[in-house]
Structure formats: structure tokens, C-alpha cells
Image: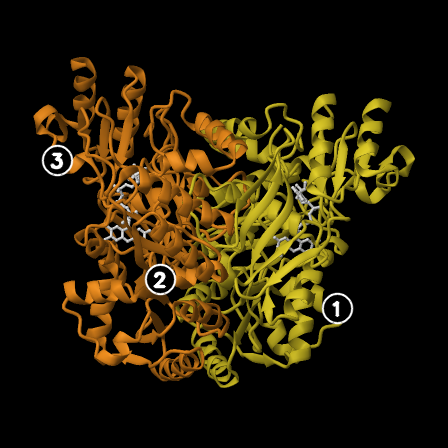
Chain colours: A yellow, B orange
Amino acid sequence: MADVAARFAEVVGEHNLLSGAQVGEDYASDESLTCEPRKPAYVAKPATADEVAALLTAAAEHGVPVTARGSGTGLSGAARPREDGLLISFERMNAVLEVDVDNQVAVVQPGVTLAELDEKTAAAGLAYTVYPGELSASVGGNVSTNAGGMRAVKYGVTRHNVLGLQAVLPTGEILRTGGKTSKISTGYDLTQLIIGSEGTLALVTEVIVKLYPRLAHGATLLAPFGDLDQVMGAVPKIIASGLTPNILEYIDNLTMAAISYNEKLELGVPEEIKNATQAYLVVGLENRDGDRLDGDVERAGELLGELGATDVYVLDGGSARKLIEAREKAFWSAKAAGADDVIDVVVPRSEMPAFLARVRELATAAEGGALGCGHAGDGNVHMGIFCKDPERRRKLLHDIFAAGMAVGGAISGEHGIGQSRKEHYAELEDPAKLALLRRIKQAFDPQGILNPGTLFD
Amino acid sequence: MADVAARFAEVVGEHNLLSGAQVGEDYASDESLTCEPRKPAYVAKPATADEVAALLTAAAEHGVPVTARGSGTGLSGAARPREDGLLISFERMNAVLEVDVDNQVAVVQPGVTLAELDEKTAAAGLAYTVYPGELSASVGGNVSTNAGGMRAVKYGVTRHNVLGLQAVLPTGEILRTGGKTSKISTGYDLTQLIIGSEGTLALVTEVIVKLYPRLAHGATLLAPFGDLDQVMGAVPKIIASGLTPNILEYIDNLTMAAISYNEKLELGVPEEIKNATQAYLVVGLENRDGDRLDGDVERAGELLGELGATDVYVLDGGSARKLIEAREKAFWSAKAAGADDVIDVVVPRSEMPAFLARVRELATAAEGGALGCGHAGDGNVHMGIFCKDPERRRKLLHDIFAAGMAVGGAISGEHGIGQSRKEHYAELEDPAKLALLRRIKQAFDPQGILNPGTLFD
Ligand SMILES: Cc1cc2nc3c(=O)[nH]c(=O)nc-3n(C[C@H](O)[C@H](O)[C@H](O)COP(=O)(O)OP(=O)(O)OC[C@H]3O[C@@H](n4cnc5c(N)ncnc54)[C@H](O)[C@@H]3O)c2cc1C
Ligand SMILES: Cc1cc2nc3c(=O)[nH]c(=O)nc-3n(C[C@H](O)[C@H](O)[C@H](O)COP(=O)(O)OP(=O)(O)OC[C@H]3O[C@@H](n4cnc5c(N)ncnc54)[C@H](O)[C@@H]3O)c2cc1C
């Protein structure tokens, strides 16, 4: 053991290797509500891909399991290390290496936070359009979870916005995949295979992300609906309108009440309308041209009225920002309200009303509750699950996931399987598919040292 | 041998199995200019995924290599069967199973042609936005080559527009991947891994494609430039403008002359401008609103002028359609002109001027020629290579591919490696990456029966 610690220290330098009591609580978990923290034996903070490769080589030789960590904001326990393991923290590999205006890409190290990338790209009039709710998240973590967020309805998720990677295999080999080009048909797409693999196939040491022109004009509309089904029914119509919203969220009335209270949100919705509201739709629009935006806002307002909104509020800049921020913090509200778990099932848009109705039934039967909001445009439902009894909760989650899959959906739209969902995943996924995933895992990681216990056992 | 033929016939029915002299020339190759036709021992035409699975099981038992075939319009020889092999032709699995308006997806069998899908989606006001130059191509072939085309600059390539698959493993297992949702973070993305795998990992028996609202208004601008570098320099500026062109092509002067002559194209460009032109830029714009389109056309015209176009022609509908069709047929023009090969290297947009200059040098040094056009917005250069001597041509191609890779590009942006590029691919690709691809291949196809000789040997 001393032996392997010496090897790790040799690679990253003494002061970049922590072990024993030096390892802080922070490294023991991510933000998952259900995975008990677990401190790793070692934390190493490499500065280069070569150091990552050397760490992996040493770990492989000594059979030490390795978990990668970005900012630890994940919600599935995927960054929770093993007690006997090495946690590789990418906090020092946090440089934006290049913002390339001509090719509209940025080249970044994995530890760069989204907040920092947003600042650097803004300076060039560009934007990396993947905005999960937590901007302290790292690009490396985003890649590994295939993070989404509110803008995915227009711009797609991480998968659609990453063009290339540098990645280190558990065997210590350093590969480059993809590049600064938007398309490639030259061999199997390793970029796409590594995206969403939750640190189980390779460690990401550089990322080429796609950028878009940052549009100058934006507006946010808030539309209360008396009926949840109506909200859901409105979503496909808004998508079909060609208005191309960059935000299309639903927020149920209790969640709206909670985030409004927590964030001191005052949006000007009269009490009597609030009381008659089952859910809200938030529609974001943007344009490079102010007049066109105004036209779109008008059209969207009319459309929302036709689709059954009891009223439509065009929020001023300050209120809009506050609402979006409050929505981003819905997770903390749910946590503060005592939610026992948070899920993000994805279903086809058209199945949302039936799915939500089924979830309510299941929650009621389990003597629990399920409340939330979600990326409605993507059919991605984020819900706080309230059910104290672990066994009943386990069954409730199983039934909710099964209900989502039964209508053509999946357990997770953006948070991943991690350690908190793997039991359900093993129970519900097609065994032939799981066997294939394991063979792919084997192709990357024959010794099984990368993030064991995440995704599957 | 009689044995296995009987098994195949049992699966698909006598009249859907061809062998010996019954096998027509058509099944012997795709449209690659360099792969000699090679008739397969058997052609089977299954009607269902179960039949495909049964064929694969029988083939695996008898060690018979299997090649899939869509419409045979591929340009890399990837659908060329083995002489001792079974060709599975998807021509009978050609139904559009569903156009789902609420979820904006279509569910199709792999043998559906793009022309037919275009017709069926148009009826619903939607579009499948992947338009490679040849609309007789099948969706299954598109998936397997990760086809692109002119609209990719706005809508992305096949990879960005396929949400789910039904696929049969060489072991006979039938899997479903993805679904009618735009995002999933639930296990490795098998959809993306199968896309672009050129029939070497699994056979695709159903495809869920993403649809977009079909925009009512479109316009096409033609801009001649005196200088090729200027054309290339203009491309990033047009992308940065936020005009979001749905077509952004360059056509060099000789290619324009050839396609104009072959397709009797008369675009109203005066002789003296033609003579002073090194290359043309074609810019397509579209909008759901006619007035906005007019505004964009005006802005684009000004911009092209500022960027050095000697003139700008806004083509009327008929001329525009003819130009686009002629551009789509550039391959046939190159073939008719005696091109010895056709390549589609992709490089970062900003590298196009340097790359094209290098290709000219290399071609001249090889006493050959390289002419063409390309998806400029994507950095995807399509070129006819003229060089009769096979050894010199081999070296020329090697050097061109190496030059593309040296500036961060890849051998193929959309046609694939197939059988015609695999030697170069083996020489130029990182051996560690190739070894990993082989291990992935092994994870899907332990016996190696799927399309052996394509991608790698
Ligand atoms: C308030 C809040 C709101 C959120 N909203 C959203 C949302 O809207 N959409 C959404 O998708 N997510 C959301 N999340 C979840 C989270 O922010 C994302 O999953 C994010 O991508 C995690 O990034 P991270 O850097 O914190 O990763 P971590 O939690 O550190 O790690 C996540 C996974 O990535 C792996 N990993 C990290 N770095 C690397 C690397 N360099 N190489 C290989 N593997 C690596 C880890 O091993 C782990 O498997 C939210 C979280 C919070 C707390
Ligand atoms: C004039 C012309 C213009 C073209 N322009 C473009 C262009 O702009 N962009 C572009 O990308 N391409 C272009 N192409 C190339 C070609 O049209 C595409 O590659 C197309 O995707 C091939 O489809 P196909 O059905 O003909 O496939 P095929 O040639 O039959 O097969 C292609 C590959 O797919 C595999 N395959 C086919 N069906 C299946 C299945 N069901 N399951 C698994 N594997 C399968 C085959 O084994 C083979 O590996 C052009 C071709 C021509 C002739």
C-alpha cells in the first residue's frame, strides 16, 4: 500500500496526493441524496494527461480501483469513490485552452467549470449552450453524465455539443477522438461512446466543445394552466410552431410555491390565478434581432392562450433571470423540503400526461408523494420523491422507472445511472443489452479498475 | 453449402433467396469507383427483424460472412459482399411505420428510401433533414455510413438525427436502443455506436428518426469569388453571422462548368464574371416567415459582397432547384469526366484554404488533378481525383489523407472507410485506437461474420 502511494506521489508530486486523514469530506460523495459518503484511500490531482496515464498505469499494476471526479455535483452517486480506491480529481486541469472563433469551438481541460467557460466564450460573442442547473459542474463531469439542462430543447445535450476528446484508457494509452469538425465517418465514434459512460470506460483529459453565436435578445414567458394535462398537451404544439424556444419547462404548483418561497420570487401572478393553477409553463425565446423577438413573443403569447393558459406573463429581465435561477435550484428546494430522492425519467413528449398521472397513482398507493418540474420540451421529468420507508420507496422507484420504460422512456434523461440507480437498471434493462455493455466495458477496461460499482456491479 | 442455402430459404422463403446465376450484377457492388464488383454466393431478402436474426444465426453456425445492403449508393465499397458470403438486402423492409407528429419522429424500416421518407413527412408538414446527394439511398445505409449532405451545416448529420434503433447482433439477439426521446443518459449509447459502423457491428432493422417542421420559405444565393482562399475565408464569417444557412457549399470553377454543361444549367452569370471566378459559394436560407426570409437574403447578399464576392445572384425557385440538383450530381459529373477516385476528407473549417492549397500541390506533383466542391460549412471537401497510375494514385491519396489528418481532420466526413479506404486508414490511424475498435468489434461480433473486410481486415 505504501508502495502504490509512493508511485502516485511520484507522478503528481507529494502535495497533490492526499491520503488518510488528509482526504476531506467533500471527496466522499456527489450530491446524490441516497448514496452514503465514502472516503477514498487516495486523492490525486494530476495536471496533465501524461500524469493521468501514469496514475492509471500504477493503479492497474496494483489493482487499485479508480474514480474520476469533476465538481462532485452529480446526482447519481457516480463520482463516489471506493474506500480502497484512488480518486482522480480534475480540479487542477481547469484551463480553457482555446476559444477558436473561426471554427466555433473551444478546447478545454475537463476541470473547467461551466461558469468559467460561459465567461470566456461570452467574451468572444459565443456560447457553449449546455446549461445544466449547476454551473459549478465541470465539463468533464458533463461529458461523463451526458448532461442536459434547460437549453437542451433547442441546442441538444452534451452529446450534441462535444466534437472531440482526449481520453486516457485504463491501460494508460492516451487517445484523441473526433476533432474540430462537426462530422466524421471514420471508424466507430469513440467520442460518443465515452460521452455518458460515467467514468467507466476512459478518463477525459481534454474536450472540444461546439459553440454557437450568443444571441443578443431574449425573453421569458410564464403561463399558468389550470390543468396539468393541458400543459403537457401544449408542449408538442409549441415545438411544432417553429418558434424554437430555448427553454420549455413545466413547474407544478407546489414546486412553484416552494421555489418562490425559497428564492423570494415575486412574479406578479395574482393570488386567485395562483390558486387555480395546477402547473406553469416557462417559455424562453431568443433572437439575434430585437424586432423578430418581439414578433415571436407576441405569437407565443397568442399560442399559449389558444392552448389553454389562464394568462400569460412576459417577465422583465430581472424577474426572468430570477425565475430561471430559482428553477435551477429546484433540487435544493426539494432537498430542503425533505425529498428522499430525486429522479429524472425521460419519456416521449406525448406520453408525459399519462406518465405523470401514473406516477401520482403510484406515489399515492405507496403513501408517498412525487412533485416536480421538468424539461417538458424533452419529455424529461424531474421529481422529488417523498417516501420515508426504504422498502416502499425502493418499490415505488422501481414502479416509476418501469412505467417510464413501458411508454418508451428511460430511467434517466440526464443524471445517469451511477450507483444510486444501478439496481433498478439491472432489474429493468434487457439482459442481452446489459451483457453487450459489459463486453464493451471489457474492451476498454479488461481489469475492471475504472469506477467499479457505477452503472453495474 | 446446400445445407446453409436451405436454412436461408427456410427463413425468408424460396423466392426471397437468390444464389448462383440468380444473383444480379447490381448486388455485386455499390457506387465506389475503385472496388471491383464481387457477386455474393447468396442474396436473402428478409421481411422482419426475426428473419434477419434467423439468417444471422444460420450464417454464424456455418461461418458464412454477412454483408448488409441498402440501396447500394455508398461510395466506399462498404456494401460489397464477399464471394463466399450472404448479402442481406433490405429492399423488402421498406415501410414508413409511423410519422408521429406530437413527438416529431418517424419510425421506419431500414430499406425506406430518403425520397419516400421525404414524401411521407412532407404530408405531415415535417422533414427528415438529412439529405445526402442521392435520395434513392436507404435510411439503413444512411445510419451505417452516418451520411451527411448539404443540409448538415444547419441540421447535423445522421448521427444527430437518429434517436433510436432496433438492431440484430451477429449472435441473433434483437435489441432496441434509444427511443422517441431526444436524450437519454442510461448506459452506453449503443445507438451512436452503431451509427457509422458500416454494417460491421449489427444489422439495423428499425430506425427512429427526428423530424423538424418543414419551413415554408426558402431562397438560394450564388456568389462567385475571384479567389478560392476568399471563399474559404468567407465561410466562418457567414456561420458567425447567425443567419443559420441550411446550405453552404463551395463549387470550384471547373466543377461548376462541368455540372452546368451536364445538367444544362443556365444561372445568368455573365461570361466575364465566370472567367474571373475561381470558385462559387452557394448559400441556402430558409424561414417559416416570408418577410424574415427576405430580410435574411438582403443581409446575406450584403455580407457576401463585404466578404469579396464579385457579385451575388438570388436564384429564382427553378434555377435554385436545378443548381442544387446539379450539385448533388457532381459525383456523376466527376465519374463521367474520368475521375479515378472521389474523396471526402473533412478538416476544421478554418483549415480549408491551407488544405486545398496542399492538395493542389500534391496533385500537381503526382501529375494528377484534384477538383471539386464541398460542404464548406462543415469543412467537408468532396474531390474527384484524376491520376491514372495506380501506384502514384495510391501515394497521392495517402498524402492527401495525411495532410487532412495533420490539420486535425479525418479521412472521411460522410462516406466512410468501407473497403476502399481501409488500407490508408490502417496506415494512418493511431494503432492504439485501431486496437480498441477491434476489441469493440469483438464485443459485438465474436466470430467476425459481419461485413469482414470493411473498415479493417
Ligand atoms: C442544483 C443542481 C442542478 C442540476 N441540474 C442539472 C440539469 O439541469 N441537467 C443535468 O444534466 N444535470 C444537472 N445536475 C447534475 C450535475 O450538475 C451534472 O450531472 C454534471 O454534469 C456533473 O458534473 P460534475 O463536474 O459535478 O461531475 P461529478 O459529479 O464530479 O462526476 C460525474 C461523473 O463524471 C465522471 N467524471 C468526472 N470527471 C471526469 C473525467 N475528467 N473523465 C471521466 N469521467 C469523469 C465521474 O466519475 C462521475 O461518473 C444538477 C445538479 C445540481 C446539484
Ligand atoms: C450521386 C451521389 C451523391 C451522394 N452524396 C452524398 C452526400 O452528399 N453525403 C453523404 O453522406 N453521402 C452521399 N452519397 C453516398 C451514399 O448515398 C450514402 O453513403 C448513403 O448513406 C448510402 O445508403 P445506401 O442505402 O445506398 O447504403 P449501401 O451503399 O447499400 O450501404 C452502405 C453501408 O451501410 C450498410 N448497411 C446498409 N443497410 C444496412 C442495415 N440495414 N443495417 C446495417 N448496415 C447496413 C452496408 O453494409 C454498407 O456498409 C452519395 C452517393 C451518390 C451516388
Task: Using the rendered image of the protein, determine whether residue A1 is visible from the camera's viewpoint.
Answer: no
Query: Which residue extends farthest right?
Result: A21
Is disc 1 surrounded by few (<14), some (14 to 19) or many (20+) residues within 10 Å? some
User: Along the horizontal axis of the image, is B380 left or right of B76?
Assistant: right
Q: Quadrant of ligand 2?
A: top left
Disc 3 sits on a residue from what chain? B
User: Along the horizontal axis of the image, is A3 left or right of A322?
Assistant: right
Q: Which residue is mark 2?
A: B151
Secondary structure under the numbered disc 3 in the rendered image: helix
Foreground pick, B71 / A397:
B71
Q: In which quarter of the view is residue B378 placed?
A: bottom left
Residue drawn at (59%, 68%) of the image: A126
Residue B368, image x, y percentages: 29, 50
Q: Which amino acid, mark 3? A: Glu
Which quarter of the image is occupied by the C terminus of chain B?
top left
Task: Using the rendered image of the protein, determine whether residue A228 is visible from the camera's viewpoint.
Answer: yes
